[in-house]
Image (spheres, rainbow, N blue to C red):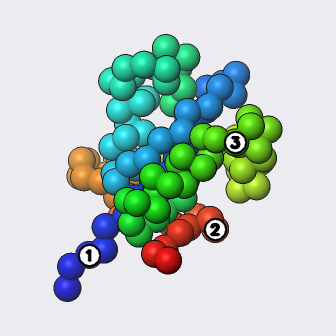
Amino acid sequence: MTQQRQYYVYILASWSKSLYIGVTNNLLRRVLEHKQRVVKGFAKRYRIHRLVYYEACSEVRIALQREKQIKSWRREKEVGLVKTTNPEWKDLAASWLRSWAVSGQGRDPSPRLPARAGSRGSG
């Protein structure tokens, strides 16, 4: 049996709450890249590296559509989306990163990440 691929729409925030919205198929790796400031551009320049929201999608097409939809929103609506599941703006990846570092596995646990309430499947 093949494992179904997951795609993630995610929102990162800086301490001043500047936002970055993206899509990935490997959420832990992508968050690590942002935290290590490997990703050039807006997120690196403004130190945007705290994962404050994510949702899982079963198809890349759906994830890309959702990313585009969220990016088209006014800032107030984007902030509202974050607040629905993370009103304190906590770094959702903090515990994953600690577990990953302690385990020494060096592999991505993102296939086992909990699906968010806003998870999207096909159709």
- Indicate which disc residue 3 carries: 1
Q: Quick check: 40 left or right of 1?
A: right
**Residue 72 in the image: x percent, y percent?**
64, 41
* Near-viewer residue (45 or 97): 45
Give the Cα separation between the discs numbered 1 and 3: 33 Å
At mark 2, the secondary structure is: loop
Q: Please name the residue that numbered disc 3 is placed on.
A: 73
Q: How many marks?
A: 3
At mark 3, the secondary structure is: loop
Q: Amino acid at mark 3?
A: Trp
At mark 1, the secondary structure is: loop
* Near-viewer residue (39 or 114): 39
Give the Cα separation between the discs numbered 3 and 2: 19 Å
Image depth: mark 3 or mark 2 in front: 3
Please tell me which residue is depicted at 36% across the width and 25% down the height of the picture. Answer: 39
**Residue 112 in the image: x percent, y percent?**
39, 67
Q: Please name the residue that numbered disc 2 is placed on.
A: 117
Q: Earlier in the sequence, mark 3 or mark 2?
A: 3
Please tell me which residue is depicted at 76% across the width and 44% down the height of the picture. Answer: 77
User: In terms of image quadrants, where is residue 30?
Assistant: top left
Please tell me which residue is depicted at 74% across the width and 35% down the height of the picture. Answer: 75
Q: Amino acid at mark 2?
A: Ala
Q: Quick check: 116 left or right of 108?
A: right
**Residue 37 in the image: x percent, y percent?**
39, 22
Q: Amino acid at mark 1?
A: Gln
- Indicate which disc residue 37 carries: none
Q: Residues within 10 Å of mark 3 (few under 14, many from 20)?
A: few
Q: Residues within 10 Å of mark 1 (few under 14, many from 20)?
A: few
